[in-house]
Amino acid sequence: MKRKSFLLILLVVSLPGCSKSNSLEKKFFNSSHDCWVVYSQNQPSYTFWKFNNNKTSDNLSRDESGTLETFNIDGDLVIGPKKWQVSSDSILSWGMHKYDVINANKNLIVLMYEENETHKQEHIFLVKENKSTLRKGAYYFEQKRLKNPQKYISSN
């Protein structure tokens, strides 16, 4: 009887425990030194987000000195914090939207969604960046292409 009880206790202890976040959700969490830069196929610009352990996400904005600060409210517009969670079948619920998590590692997350009007499959890319790294904005790359179109001509 003692042996059976010991085996039962050992089995219960060895089973994966229930936790508040699954392993895929853990890939979304940010440290105090990093954030996600969110790129969309439909927008040339990008946004900064921080996914918190309490299942909320904060929109971030750069101030004049280049420091990222929480930017959840802009006048009457409430941007965040947004609630989020990832289901066991890899569906990210983020605010009022649902995305399929196509791929995820510690530095990159690829999300897919269906565009409402065209029903076309679109992608969003979350790239983890160090908060102290200043990134060139979309305007820089747009101007680079406009000023140097010859660099983008394929030579086949």
Image (cartoon, helix red, strand yellow):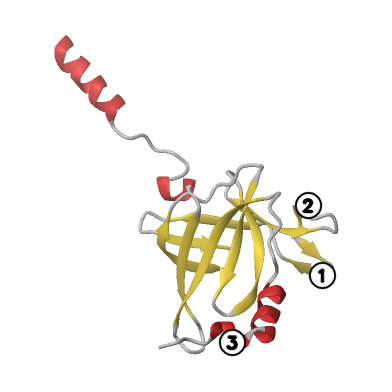
Which amino acid does the dot numbered 1 rest on? Asp
Q: CA distance from mark 3 to mark 1?
A: 44 Å
* 144 vs 111: above or below: below
Image coords of residue 29 (percent x, y): 55, 47
Q: Position of residue 126 (x, y in %)?
A: 54, 61
Q: Nearer the viewer, residue 150 or 141?
A: 150
Residue at x 39% of width, y 38% of height = 18
Which three-letter amino acid code belongs to the residue tagged 2?
Answer: Thr
Residue linked to disc 3? 150
Q: Is residue 7 above or below residue 64?
A: above
59 to the left or right of 151? right
Left or right of 153 in this view: 13: left
- The answer for how far apart the CA atoms under marks 2 and 1 are is 24 Å
Quarter of the rendering containing residue 104: bottom left
List the residue tagged with mark 2.
67
Q: In the drawing, does residue 21 fall left or right of residue 54?
A: left
Which mark's residue is nearer the viewer, 2 or 1? 2
User: Is residue 41 shown to the viewer in this render?
Assistant: yes
Q: Earlier in the sequence, mark 3 or mark 1?
A: 1
- The answer to which image quadrant residue 78 occupies is bottom right
Marks 3 and 2 sit apart, C-alpha to C-alpha, by 36 Å
Q: Are marks 2 and 1 in contact (CB under 8 Å)?
A: no
